[in-house]
Amino acid sequence: MSGSRMWLCLLGLALAAPVAAQGDGGALYAYRPHAGEKVRFDEGYGRHLEWHREKRDSLPWYGWDVVAGRRMGEFIDGTFGIAFAALDQRVGPAGDATDAAATFGSYAQPTGRWLVRLRRDLGTAAPLEDRAPAALMQVVTYRVPPTARPAFEAALQAVRGKEGYAPYAVYECVIGTGEAEYMLVVGHAGYAGFENAKRDPARALSLELADRAVPGVTAESELWQLRQDLTLLPDR
């Protein structure tokens, strides 16, 4: 089995479930379209979403273009607000993989796959779980040494306990990363959301980490733009 074929089979694990039990699990996938193939990738991915619609896939599926940051130019899709068990209850994985290969698989290179868990105790909102995505998402990924995790989470809880910040979600990466990772996600209706730095929870967390002298934490920020045309939100 080729590498691309194997990846598409793995993709089938997370894209189709007869009943998507609600929960705080999520799965994300990243693709980099080949040079000159972005339009074909988008068109093919849109056709693949129709396969899921026809199969009455109950998983919500979001699509984003990365418009700023290291992965700029990549496409990321993800399902959120599900029990992880829903990934075991897929419908037609062989047909899913075959359709994915035929529609968009040849137009991009897969670059990442990871599972996350929403940490409601560390954030203040859950728009993806509520199926209310923002037009833009500020995504800050923190890489944390294992020994620093308690101090890092304490800093997050300290920020959560203060008022005046834009609503945000925090995800803990559970598999697919090289070390402990957390994602802080802030939704914005547009670029005007960046005007007031005092409302930025990521900035507040950076100051809190510095005050607490939490060692070894690195951060990387990206901006994801929602592709409403490449998003599938089935009825609950």
Image (tube, rainbow, N blue to C red):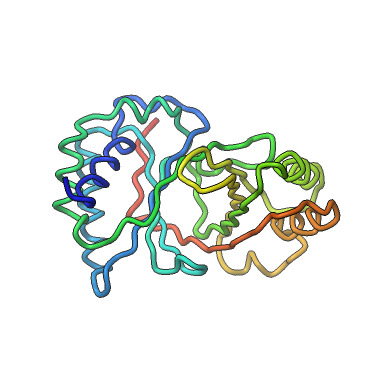
Q: Residue at x 14, y 52 (%)?
A: 102
Q: Is residue 36 above or below residue 161?
A: below
Nearer the observer, 14 or 190: 14
Q: Is residue 107 above or below residue 50?
A: below
Q: Quadrant of the N terminus?
A: top left
- Relative placement, left or right, of 15 versus 81 is left
Residue 193 pos. (x, y %):
63, 64
Q: Residue at x 25, y 33 (%)?
A: 56
Residue 82 pos. (x, y %):
45, 31
Number of marks in picture: 0
- Relative placement, left or right, of 129 versus 14 is right
Q: Quadrant of the C terminus?
A: top left
Residue 60 pos. (x, y %):
38, 39
- Relative placement, left or right, of 136 versus 164 is left
Residue 23 pos. (x, y %):
50, 28
- Relative placement, left or right, of 186 versus 25 is right
Q: Residue at x 56, y 65 (%)?
A: 190
Q: Report the residue that reaches farthest toward the right.
A: 211
